[in-house]
Image (spheres, rainbow, N blue to C red):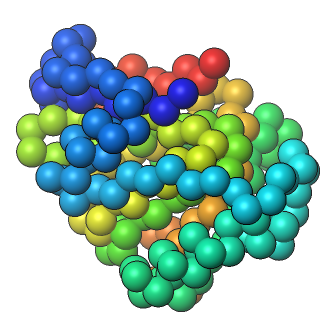
Amino acid sequence: MTRLTVYADGDPAVALLDTDDPARIADALAPIGVAFERWQASAPLAADADAEAVLAAYAPEVARLKQAGGYTTVDVARVTPATPNLEAVRTKFLDEHTHGEDEVRFFVEGSGAFYLHRDGKVFQVVCHAGDLLSVPAGIPHWFDMGPQPRFTAIRFFRTPEGWVASFTGDGIAKRFPLYEAA
């Protein structure tokens, strides 16, 4: 289940907000410029659906978001326990970083946790299938896919280079608990 937990950035032991209500999640993220939506597939998807089938199942939502956000490139990323170099893939995203463009992800299956560092707070958003999260360019964040990752996500980009990170050098991510997917 989707969950938002908000902490003071200096105290990961005390939650300032903890909710699984999608409307409250969207309302809490909006002031920091982060969009949260829930999408439904237009057709059932097989667990091993290829990228073409995934994009077809969400075609109206993908087209709307591409036009609204000016995204020119859309792809499908899949990570499973069989993904090569899995620990290195997980570690790549665990340090706080920013991007020169929005980071937009729609979870088709599985889960992962985004940690957004803004306005003296850390917003931990645990996303599951059906969740869209759009993080504006420049917001410091990190991502944890968990120790046994399994997710498929549609990714949106404005430039062909796609995911390019600028690491902040702040060790904040190491002070917050890792995501331990169920």
> With respect to residue 179, does 158 lie above or below?
below
Image quarter of residue 103: bottom left
Query: How many labels, in total?
Result: 0
Q: Looking at the image, which residue is at 29% across and 21% down?
A: 18
Q: Position of residue 113 (x, y in %)?
A: 47, 36
Q: Quadrant of the N terminus?
A: top right
Q: Position of residue 37 (x, y in %)?
A: 44, 53
Q: Is residue 145 left or right of residue 140?
A: right
Judging depth in this view, the residue of 115 and 107 nearest the camera is: 107
Q: Looking at the image, which residue is at 73% across and 62% down?
A: 42
Observer able to see residue 56? yes
Q: Is residue 58 left or right of residue 47?
A: left
Judging depth in this view, the residue of 105 and 9 nearest the camera is: 105
> With respect to residue 146, does 33 lie above or below?
below
Q: Position of residue 61 (x, y in %)?
A: 57, 70
Q: Residue furthest left?
A: 120
Image quarter of residue 53: bottom right
Q: Looking at the image, which residue is at 58% across and 38% down?
A: 128
> With respect to residue 22, does 30 lie above or below?
below
Q: Is residue 43 left or right of residue 37?
A: right
Q: Residue furthest top?
A: 13
Q: Is residue 4 left or right of residue 122?
A: right
Observer able to see residue 88? no
Q: Looking at the image, which residue is at 39% across and 60% down?
A: 134
Q: Quadrant of the C terminus?
A: top right
Q: Position of residue 34 (x, y in %)?
A: 29, 56
Image quarter of residue 16: top left
